[in-house]
Every structure is written in C-alpha cells, then in structure tokens.
Image (cartoon, rainbow, N blue to C red):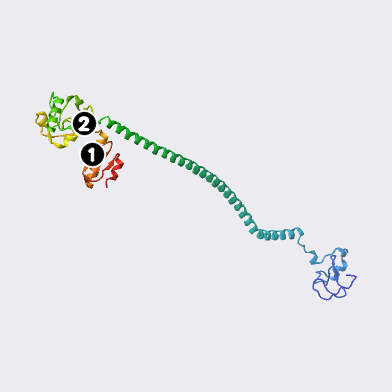
Amino acid sequence: MGNMDPETCTSCKEKLPIDYVTCSQGCVLHFNTCAGLAEGTWRKMSNKSEWKCPTCRKPKPTESAVTSAELRQFMNTVTEKLAPVQQISGLKASMEELKNSVDFMSSKYDEVLCKVADLQNQNAEQAATLDLLKTENEEKEKVIEELKIRMREAEQYARNRNIEISGVEFIKEENLITVMENLAEQLQIRFKENEIDVIHRVPSRYNGTRPPKIIVQFTTRKERDFWLKHKKYASVFSNDITNGQSVSQVYLDKHLTAEWKHLLWQSKQVGRPKGYKIFWHQDSKICVKKNINEEPIIIRTAQDLQKLN
C-alpha cells in the first residue's frame, strides 16, 4: 500500500479507496480487478517492492524491433522518393552514353569532312590538270591538223605537173606515147614527146571492171594546164585513140591525192542536194558554186562542208 495518496487508479482511472496496491514501476491500482491481486495476498507478500502490475509485466516492444520496423518504413519511403532520382541517374547514364556516341559520330563526321575536303582539293587539282591537258591536246590537234593539211598540200604540190586519164581501154603491149599522140590529135593540140617526163598506168581498185588509169607527168605545170584547158573542147572515146573495142568516154583531170578526191566527192554528196552544181579543185582547195556568176565557197577540210547550206 502506498505512502502517498494518489487520486485515481492507473489502470481504470477511477478514484482510489484508502487501501490500494502500488506497482514497483510506480502504478497505483485497485485491488482485485485492476491489480489482479487480492488485498490479503498483497499483505502476505514479502517482496512488495519488486511486484509488477499486469500492465507492467507485459513485454514491451524492444527498441531494436521498433527501430527496424521504422527503418524499413523509412527505407521504403526513401526508396520510393529516390525512384525518380534513380530513373534520372539511369537517364543520366543513357545521356552520357548518347553524348559519347554523339562525340564519336562527330569525330567520324569531322574525319569524313576532312576526307571530302581532300577529295575536293584533289578533284579540283585533277580538273585543273584535265583542263590543262585538254587545252594542250586541242592545241596539239590543231598543230596535227595543220601538219596534215601541209602534208596533203605538199603531196598534191608534187603532182602539180600530172594529169590523170581514165576510160582508156587497156591493150596488151600498148604504147602509151602513141596513145598520147592519138589523144592530142582528137583534142586538136600539138604533141611533143619531150614534154613528158613519165607516163604509166596505175592499178585499178575496181578489180578489172574498169581499165587502169594513165598518169602523165609533164615537164612543166604550164604544159599540164594546156592539156587540161583543151579537154573541154572535145568528147573523146576510147576506141578513137586505141583502135580497141571499148567506146567508153575518156576523161582528163588533175592527178589528185586520195584525200583530195575524197573531199571533192564529199563536197558533191553534200552540195548537190542543196543546189550546188559546180565543183573543182584549185590551189589546195575545193571550190563549190551554185552557178557560174557567184563567188565560190572554199572547202579545205571536212568541217568546211558545213558551209554548204
């Protein structure tokens, strides 16, 4: 029984009677119902100072258990709170990887740009070299074309004393000087054998369908021109000068090179459909006219055929 007079029971909170029981932990309680102890039993107890009421005898939660539960709750809360942060951390790692990838791609892109720049420089250098080579080639082509023209003119100049006679029947063991004498008679011009340097036939490219042409080289160009001038005044046939069977017409022309013959032929092929009627070779050029009164168009190369319009 206590020495002080508390007002209420610790357990039921009602007013205490004069006699009550005191717990070693400081609780004051009614006998029987609240203390779970009869008054007689209490009086017989020798160790009243150690007695504990039913409430104090109940085991209290340990601090470690409470702390662990609270800690788990706290950790769960922290985990929940940190989840976005962890996501941000993961995002940060992804961003770091992305940054590294971008940096890598950027460095590769820079390398590509450098290589492209190098290629562009090389291309520019090659283009400049190509232009230079093209210019040099064009100049060389001009020089080559000029040399071709000069060679063609020189080759033709070497023939400026020659005439070419076609259509004369070939007679076995013929005498070409006699043929020339007979031709001069038909043209009604004088003939002097000493005015001829060389006379011979050339192989025919027609495989026997036409007689080989006769090439005559005079001692002077003047004599050559004299014969060409008189070819216009008479029509001569093969049997008139050979006593052979052929009655083909005989033609006298300048002894042109193969190139000049081809260019003359091209001029006729292009010009005749366009109304050009007069074609001749003179002084290293082909002359073309539509009529006798107009100025001739000069053709020296195949490119000049464009003038015929």
Q: Residues within 10 Å of mark 1 (few under 14, many from 20)?
A: some
Which quarter of the picture shows residue 278? top left
Q: Give amino acid for label 2.
A: Arg
**Residue 68 horizontal/vertical position (percent):** 72, 58
**Residue 5 horizontal/vertical position (percent):** 88, 73
Pick whichever, 217 or 37, lies toward us. 217
Q: Residues within 10 Å of mark 2 (few under 14, many from 20)?
A: many
Question: Seen in the image, is 76 located left or right of residue 255?
Answer: right
Observer able to see residue 153: yes
- Tell me which label, 1 or 2, sits earlier in the chain: 2
Q: Which circle, 1 or 2, is nearer the viewer?
A: 2
Judge whether 35 appears above or below 221 on screen: below
Residue at the outermost right position: 3
Do the CB atoms of the residues marked 1 and 2 lie less than 8 Å apart?
no
Q: Which residue is mark 2?
A: 224
Observer able to see residue 206: no
- Residue drawn at x 48%, y 43% is 124
Q: For marks 1 and 2, give the CA distance.
A: 16 Å
Quadrant where the N terminus sits is bottom right
Q: Describe the element under mark 1 as helix, strand or loop.
A: strand
- Residue drawn at x 79%, y 64% is 57
Pick whichever, 106 or 8, lies toward us. 106
Q: Describe the element under mark 2 as helix, strand or loop.
A: helix
Instruction: Give the number of the disc on residue 185.
Output: none
Pick whichever, 263 or 179, lies toward us. 179
Q: Give amino acid for label 1.
A: Trp
Question: Seen in the image, is 11 located left or right of residue 244?
Answer: right
Q: Which residue is mark 1?
A: 280
